[in-house]
Amino acid sequence: MTRSASIFLGLLLTAASAVRAQSPAIIREEFIYDTASFPECHAATIAETPKGLVTAFFGGTKERNPDVCIYVSRKDQGSTKWSAPVNVANGIQSSTLRYACWNPVLYQIPAGDLLLFYKVGPSPAKWKGWLIRSKDGGTTWSKPESLPEGILGPIKNQPVRLVNGALLCPTSTEGNGWHIHFEQTTDAGRTWQSSTPPADTFRAIQPTLLRYKNGSIQALSRSENRAILSTVSKDNGHSWSPQQPIGLPNNNSGIDGTTLADGRQLLVYNHVLPPPGATKGERSPLNVALSPDGITWYAALVLDDDHTGQYSYPSVIQSANGKVHIVYTWHRKKIKYVEIDPEKLKLEKIENGIWPSSIKK
């Protein structure tokens, strides 16, 4: 090895050691793909199947453009790489009409199909819900099924499975203001019913669902009110309390959370407070926080933070081995994947909505 090569390798190892020292909980971080046939991507979702991990996202020339399709990549057990993105759904309506695809949501039914919900339409105000199914862990897919009129399916984040086997789906509409609501299906998306939505005090969309040992379910939502909003159901999602802000800011961008096996709640979001009077803020940094009760939150990790682009629209699950898996939009150019050991997260309480300076990337 030449001297210059030796120095270069030493610098790489030093940098890697520094990252590990700052983020001991991070097991792996990588891009789902290096190159693709589409220039932009967004709104990733992730699920664990009996075969391994599967992610889906939309890609095309630009969000809203008719060429935007749903793509799927897999990382089978034992594999070190994600498969190349495969186009599994498009918005072709006829030989003369085509719409964009939006916001895929994956859900693996225990001992059943892998479901992929997505939307098709010219805008979020006018889109329609669709569903495809896979019986082989995301390798092949069924023909698209149109959801019933008035049913959108999970709008960005995964359903939760209730004790009776029903899927409770967090959803929202944007056609006549921003409103969240909830839908249930007892037969894997073939028939549906809607729940009573919470009182409309705030403008909110894209809820994520968290579960508690006492049987209650908490929905946290994106809002235009500079804060993440919370509503709680104590009757399996049939009725909901009025929405209230929690002590975490929201920059009018998507969030996602999951209930860990130990009962704690893990949330991935942009910890960004828009300026007073504004409804939006930049989509950097992207943060991970934990809570024992959905009220008091502890800073855990900063996934990305360089203020040169957006890191947004996370999707998070905990796999059977206890590890946490997160995918998110990286500069709208790639989808990034991070695997975390939640037992190694360093926690510091978030006071007055301010992210502790000691918790960083």
Image (cartoon, helix red, strand yellow):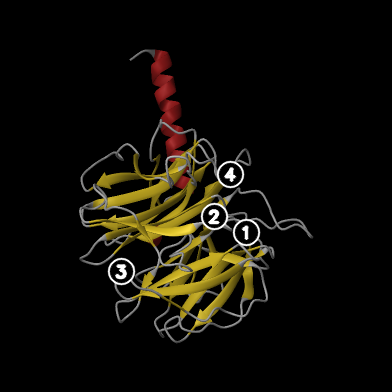
Q: What amino acid does circle 3 point to?
A: Ala
Task: Please provide percent x and percent y for residue 270.
Answer: 58, 55
Front: mark 1 or 4: 4
Q: Residues within 10 Å of mark 3 (few under 14, many from 20)?
A: some
Residue occupied by mark 1: 355
| Mark 2 to mark 1 CA distance (whole Å) | 9 Å
**Disc with the residue nearer the chain's start (3 vs 4):** 3
Residue occupied by mark 2: 287
Task: Give the quarter of the image for residue 297.
Answer: bottom right
Front: mark 2 or 1: 2
Q: Is residue 70 left or right of residue 229?
A: left
Q: Is residue 119 visible?
A: yes
Residue occupied by mark 4: 310
Q: What amino acid does circle 2 point to?
A: Asn
Q: What amino acid does circle 1 point to?
A: Trp
Q: Is residue 272 left or right of residue 208?
A: right
| Mark 3 to mark 4 CA distance (whole Å) | 34 Å
Residue occupied by mark 3: 188
Helix, strand or loop at mark 2 = strand
| Mark 1 to mark 3 CA distance (whole Å) | 40 Å
Which residue is at a point 28% across and 45% down the rendered structure image? 75
Task: Please provide percent x and percent y for residue 179.
Answer: 60, 69
Helix, strand or loop at mark 4 = loop
**Disc with the residue nearer the chain's start (2 vs 1):** 2
Asked if marks 2 and 1 touch (Cβ < 8 Å), the reply is: yes
Helix, strand or loop at mark 1 = loop
Asked if marks 3 and 4 touch (Cβ < 8 Å), the reply is: no
Which of these two is toward me, 113 or 257?
113
Which residue is at a point 40% across and 14% down the rendered structure image? 3
